Image: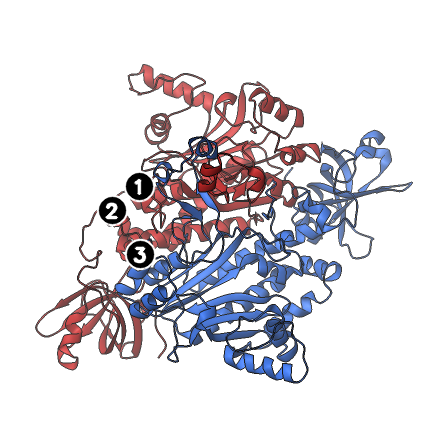
Chain colours: A blue, B red
Amino acid sequence: MKRTKIIDALSSTDFGKEINVKGWVRSHRSSKAVDFIALNDGSTIKNIQIVVEPNSFDAEIIKSITTGACLNVTGLLVESQGKGQTSEIKAESIEVYGLSPTDYPMQKKGQTFEYMRKYGHLRLRTNTFGAVFRIRHNMAIAIHEYFHSHGFYYFHTPIITGSDAEGAGNMFQVTTLDPGRIAKEGKVEYDDDFFGRKTNLTVSGQLEGELGATSLGAIYTFGPTFRAENSNTPRHLAEFWMIEPEVAFVDKEDLMDLEEDFIKFCVKWALDNCHDDLEFLNSMIDKGLIERLKGILNEKFVRLTYTEGIKILEEASCSGHKFENEVSWGMDLASEHERFLVEEHFRRPVIMSDYPKDIKAFYMKINDDDKTVQGTDVLFPQIGEIIGGSVREENYDKLMGEIERRHIPMKDMWWYLDTRKYGTCPHGGFGLGFERLILFVTGMQNIRDVIPFPRTPKTAEF
Amino acid sequence: MKRTKIIDALSSTDFGKEINVKGWVRSHRSSKAVDFIALNDGSTIKNIQIVVEPNSFDAEIIKSITTGACLNVTGLLVESQGKGQTSEIKAESIEVYGLSPTDYPMQKKGQTFEYMRKYGHLRLRTNTFGAVFRIRHNMAIAIHEYFHSHGFYYFHTPIITGSDAEGAGNMFQVTTLDPGRIAKEGKVEYDDDFFGRKTNLTVSGQLEGELGATSLGAIYTFGPTFRAENSNTPRHLAEFWMIEPEVAFVDKEDLMDLEEDFIKFCVKWALDNCHDDLEFLNSMIDKGLIERLKGILNEKFVRLTYTEGIKILEEASCSGHKFENEVSWGMDLASEHERFLVEEHFRRPVIMSDYPKDIKAFYMKINDDDKTVQGTDVLFPQIGEIIGGSVREENYDKLMGEIERRHIPMKDMWWYLDTRKYGTCPHGGFGLGFERLILFVTGMQNIRDVIPFPRTPKTAEF
């Protein structure tokens, strides 16, 4: 008999029909007359109720079915009498695929997220993590859908790289040299390493992404990136996924339009496609979640230069608002400043642009004032910076000037400079940390809880 | 004025209208009366012809426009007189975004792929690589589309891992320990490494994927995987992308159905969505390409056990067919055997199943004969094995038996075993090397030419 997914069984009104479902037991409660088993197969956050008349079954077997067990159930689809349920199954046969011993770590309700992180392989079977990872899937699909329908090509930039020009943080080294042998021989021979040179895990695909955009017109990356920073915070991972679109023939306005349109598309996708999971998270994790998501869609994002932003912050400071970090032109905005602008002053997302060049990367397009660059970051409530973007400096001489001024080691970067040497073009792009987006869309508070198997200092389990 | 993409300009019949296009010069030829510039922006393999009347422009500027230059052109869309073209542009204004010096490495036609590999950043601007990477994009979209519409969740398995149980080949070590310091101090302290232990780059996401499938019901991975094998062949990369679906509640027949349906969907997607690029590759690279792709769709794949396959090969051998490797039950099939079955004997794809257990991995479901396991590999013309799949052993004791028999280090694998301990379920899945698929769909011969920036022994450029 063909299996019916529980999401389909729950929406079926084909009452009286015999169907087959398979899944894991979320709860089993017995009354005198009848047993109720809540079964879930991951296709939806909702369980289907299996109604078991004990007389029709081997009592020992029914008793052995505890939370976490896996069942194959055939029975009649019947209209549910319970509140909020449409259909349930009157069991005719139950096959136990796998029992769940009493030490099953996920059987209690109300376990902390910290506890559940130790069981990354089993927390996936809970309501919260089921919801989070279905939403994570849907966000990935939204991203591919958006870029594909807008003529961007998915472009795989390298994970192992020899280049070091981004300077975005500490890097993980990738090697086939045997550390034990290095210790014994007292020397390091990179000639013997797999790539014949020192190599690292990528911190960003942007520079290679620019190679794609300046040939194929518009590309996006969506892949893992790595930072070997010893940051044990709810916002940092050593391994995380980034989306980095890069597009030729755009100016600053085009780029800000793209950022706003893209992020609204993603949020709308979640609201349109993840209704049940969002309802659950809204009720159990974050009461303001759905309102906040809808709020993103309702209004046009504020567009504000850094200089205008500083002025607003200075005025707030004069009017008595206390910031931990004093405000002055040239500083890098702290989270408190970003959140003041977004959550208190404007009460909607802000795209901030034209930052002082010394707080931004070497590749950003320099404005005529020679003081600011065409960065275009999107600031969100709760999150702060969710997108970091910029128009790129396409002029070879200006770009080289910045590289030299900053003493960036360019020996391995001839290929990047070639894009400005041969047929250079105006272009820009942005980066979105995927897990930051998932935090925003799920209302979860710790980034370790929105990636299946988080990598953080001293932790690489599973 | 809003830019029109060249793919849209070429299909427009809005003749007489003023439009703007931007792109890179593929060729520039001058005649007495008029100049023709072929412009490409990556949106299609086709160029749009820009017709330039020299009298209307500065002669020096027009002369400076050579292959590789980047232009911003506004002009009238006119019906083309040339064969095979629908529309062209009569230039009214030309802005040069970037010239292309005479040493531009991609200007000559007929350069070898080997030469072009040295210019991975610029080969993207050629017809062949434009076609290959647009098709690569479309295959990625097809994969997400297939799994999303079939209720699979995209699941990110870790890239950095401490586990070593797959034993799929040599691994790259990931570390923040300073090799120079190790050499100096003469000792390796993994306690000081970022993760407090030895870690590697993943060789497969399958084992973690099983964690997803046994909670969410059906997942797929699509991410980079790594093998530090010193193989300098047209079929091997040190860094490549894999797709690994894993699904609960399937048996061997279901799994073979899934494999066949999935791969046919991908091939059909290419035929439906990559017409111009396939036509180009079919005419320039591989005359049999489109026929071969269509051939995949036409017939049901042969389903054959390993034992049946060996019998056919032995009979062929008896009838005088020469194999380099002698055929006998228990051997691992070589490429020549796979290709004989697919290309000569059946002349269509084969799903081979039920392999001797000693030539397959520890996690495959053991048949009742205790000699064979439920592997389900798909063998393709030209490629050989394109998919490697299996039903997984879901019985805890049998799985442990194999692990012990093979002396697999399981100290870090408690989480994998837990899936069999708590609510175990029948499940299976398969792996598809993305670049193998792209080779098949493009007709390209070298795997280095279907990934933007290949990583191979001694090569990690860009």
Q: Position of residue B101 (x, y in %)?
A: 20, 64
For the question of whether residue B293 can be seen, the reply is no
Residue located beneath label 1 in the image? B446
CA distance for labels 3 and 2: 18 Å
Image depth: mark 3 or mark 2 in front = 3
User: Which residue lies at the image location 28% right of the left edge and 16% below the top edge?
Assistant: B320
Say which amino acid is labelled 1.
Answer: Asn
Name the image quarter holding residue A195.
top left
Please give the count of numbered marks on the rendered protein. Answer: 3
- In the image, residue B407 sits, relative to residue A317, either above or below, namely above
Q: Seen from this angle, which residue lies furthest front?
A: B184
Q: Tell me if mark 3 has few (under 14), some (14-19) or many (20+) residues whose alpha carbon lies within 10 angstroms of its own.
A: many
Respond whether the residues carrying marks 3 and 2 are from the same subunit.
Answer: no
Residue density around tag 2, few if under 14, some if 14–19, many if 20 or more, within 10 Å? some
Q: Which residue is mark 3?
A: A415
Name the residue that disc number 2 marks: B113
